[in-house]
Amino acid sequence: MLSKEDQRRFEQITRQLRESDPQFFARLDRRARARRGRLLILLTIVLWAALPATTVLAGRVAGVVCGFVLLVNAGLMWRFRRRWW
């Protein structure tokens, strides 16, 4: 964790870099979004795989709730897919 002075200095350096080389900053932003998108997809796959076990261990109601949440998650990921690629 950075001290307030270090955090202020880091933000100043970041701001200067963003102003001096916007293409570099855009490239970094795209890579971070792609990484975040891959992690979200992996998490969704793992949760879908765990759905049957959740249903068996926690009951049908928990399985239905978990399935509904995963369907909403899949819909949102589909809707905003361009943000992560």
Image (cartoon, rainbow, N blue to C red):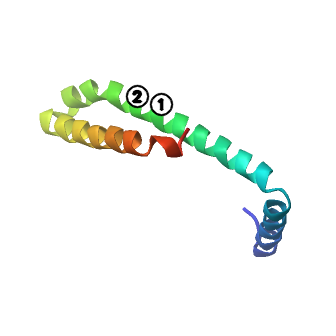
Q: Position of residue 68 (x, y in %)?
A: 22, 40
Mark 2 residue crowding within 10 angstroms, few (<14) / some (14–19) / many (20+)? some
Q: Residue at 34% of width from left, 38% of height from top?
A: 74
Q: Residue at 54% of width from left, 34% of height from top?
A: 38
Task: Give the answer, above or below, for where 68 lies relative to 22.
Answer: above
Determine which residue is flagged by label 1. 42
Q: Residue at 38% of width from left, 44% of height from top?
A: 79
Q: Which mark is residue 45?
A: 2
Estimate the spatial distance between the alpha carbons at disc 1 and disc 2, rounded to whole Å. Answer: 5 Å
Callout 1: helix, strand or loop?
Answer: helix
Quadrant of the rendered structure where residue 11 is? bottom right
Q: Is residue 75 left or right of residue 36?
A: left
Furthest residue toward left = 60
Q: Are marks 1 and 2 in contact (CB under 8 Å)?
A: yes
Task: Please tell me which residue lies in front, 65 or 74.
Answer: 74
Callout 2: helix, strand or loop?
Answer: helix
Q: Position of residue 41 (x, y in %)?
A: 46, 33
Q: Position of residue 42 (x, y in %)?
A: 48, 31
Q: Position of residue 55 (x, y in %)?
A: 20, 30
